[in-house]
Amino acid sequence: MKTYETESLRNVALIGHGGAGKTTLAEAMMYQTGVIGRMGRVDAGTTLSDIDVDEIQRQISISTSLLPVQYNGVKLNVLDTPGFADFVGEVVGALHVADTALMVIDAVNGIEVQTERYWRMADARGLARVLYVNKMDKEHANFDNTLAALKARFGSGVVALQLPIGEQTGFHGMVDLISMHALLETEDLAAPKVEAIPAELQSKAASLREAVVEAAAEANDDLTLKYLEEGDLSDEEIILGLQEGVRAGRIFPVLLGAAVKNFGTTALLDLLVSSTPAPNQVAPVAATKGDAEVTVKSNSAGALVAYAFKTTADPFAGRITFLRVYAGTLPSGSEAYNSNKEARERVGNLFAFIGKQQEPIETAKAGDIVLVAKLHASATADTLATATERVIVIPPAYPIPMLNFSIAPTNKGEEDKMAQGLHRFVEEDPTLHFEQDPETHEAIIACMGELHLGVIQDRLKRKFNVETVTGNPVVAYRETVRAAADGHGRHKKQTGGSGQFGDVKIKLEPLERGVGFEFVDAVVGGVVPRQYIPSVEKGIRETIKHGPLAGYPVVDVRVTLYDGQYHPVDSKDIAFQSAARLGFQDAITRAMPVLLEPYVNVEVTVPDEYIGDIIGGMSSKRGRVQGTEASGGGMSTVKAQVPQAEMFQYSNELRALTQGRGSFTMSLSHYEEVPPHAAEGIIADAKRRAEEER
């Protein structure tokens, strides 16, 4: 594949709700430009984009694919992203390196959940946006309703550039609202027949064209003046205005077609090449250099700055890194400096995948997106630069995974192999978290949803030969006391030789929530020698690791050592540790022990119409709503404090309740006493688990 200059590059992220036809559209673009001789099908597992086993089996996109399209002297780096919410991290990464978002809309279903979500993400990035209404040939397809919904949801910048001729199964052409010609289907769908606009559509076409002219005129002061004076613009002036408006993110052109038939693809390619921005026509990317914030503008003559926005493992090529070159030039077989890891990196051959075949790329200029295999140190969100500049591109904010599961291998002894696989997956996927809980000793995986979890489990089995089971994590409960109580512990052991003797008296008191543990030495008169005071404290610290109710750690208590006895010969460190344990156990049984549970701060952002349901749901979970606030765009955020035990499956609940339009964040807040009715069940479960482990 030849080297392209910055101005001849276009970086386009294909985004949209799952099932809208993004992968099929990418396939049509590859076919139309001669990359492939026959279009594959998602349901047959034959597309260039979905080549992973999981994608073929599920017939959905799971990860972002890079598909380079060469058309009219321009290289389009098409990033085909997943549409399902569980894989939103892939969309975040793609939008961070794209300059244009191509939103695919299903003409049957219209605006769907992820359509809105991904639009907001593209809008936050300030990207140019193009809308493609797909599946115009399907039953119940309705372009007028879809266009009206797009305008209502995304504003007056939405402008139709085409009008369908026929709809549903009768769809057979479109009106070009700039040239005002009809483009009719032929056997060669990529080369439609040009005719006059059907009489019954001329009035409608004229009305829609007026909206195109007005949008083009508003994009440029000179065009505005001419339009006001003459009331019309030439085709060339319309195109000029559209180019400026699209690149500035003020005009969102709407095209239509049927990707599965490759009808409408040529017009889409023409628009992407002529009107979307090149990398040197967009705002510089934010970065840091040392402690300073800087920006990086696409310039092939500058120092190298290349950002790794994705890593994945290929069964043949090994570990593959997706790089966006923001500045400078990156040749194959060169050397760079990983600014994040502060390590030199050997860059091997650059390439792109065409299906499973590697297409070599000699050099990547500023703005290009390429793949490179087997980088030693670099991972997702790392920056390759020069050792003298050491620039770091600021990565996007990936969503925090909120669906937590405990995970364990089905076969004992495979824990290390499972952990090795999960750590590798975490390196590739910023929306996947994995840790070993130091308290419960469980392996905890946090992901975006059950589909995400299923893919991870399948990959563990396929790539690491580890089958796994999952469940809700064990909640890290605590125990404390309500009242003060005294305790006495005596350890006396005579074994025929030197004996063991230690005697302590302690006072156990409750502390404010969150203080932890305090030990106070109040001994007077040397009844417990100074050298054994640390032994008493050590014995108590060991004992509070397992409380009397359910074996959870005891917190928020003060233990005061105020009296005791010793033996000049038999007293030892171990004896006073044992006496301290006995004294604490004696005191806590009379100090009204209670169970504590963790509460989390929860912020739920949803469309306004769901606020009542969210508040009601929080109340049913023993939560306390702290308030609500407007988030803009018809969204509001509900803030609440809820017991952690009630929140493990909330991600699935929220998705079902809001049709996937809600999101939430969660962080540990504090501990509170468990209501008696709930404590009984928790204590019984803990005792049952302890019995099973014996």
Image (spheres, rainbow, N blue to C red):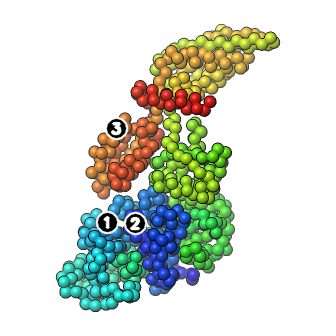
**Nearer to me, 492 or 4:** 492
Q: Residue at x 58, y 73 (%)?
A: 356
Q: Which amino acid type is marked by label 2? A: Gly
Residue 311 x %, y %: 57, 63
Residue 579 lies left or right of residue 275; in this view the side is right
Pointers 1 and 2 in contact (CB under 8 A)? yes
Mark 1 Cα within 10 Å, few/some/many (few <14, many 20+)?
Answer: some
Alpha carbon distance from label 3 to label 2: 35 Å
Give the number of marks: 3
Residue at numbered disc 1 = 109
Residue 632 lies left or right of residue 53; in this view the side is left
Q: Which residue is drawn at 35% across and 59% down?
A: 113
**Of the residues under marks 3 and 2, which one precedes in the sequence?**
2
Residue 611 x %, y %: 29, 47
Mark 2 Cα within 10 Å, few/some/many (few <14, many 20+)?
Answer: some
Instruction: Find numbered disc 2 in the image and state the secondary structure of the residue it sits on.
Output: loop
Whether residue 374 is visible here, answered yes or no, is yes
Residue 136 x %, y %: 32, 75
Q: Which amino acid type is marked by label 3? A: Ser
Figure check: 344 above or below 441: below
Residue 620 is marked as: 3
Alpha carbon distance from label 1 to label 2: 10 Å
Which quadrant of the view contains residue 674? top left
**Nearer to me, 612 or 288:** 612
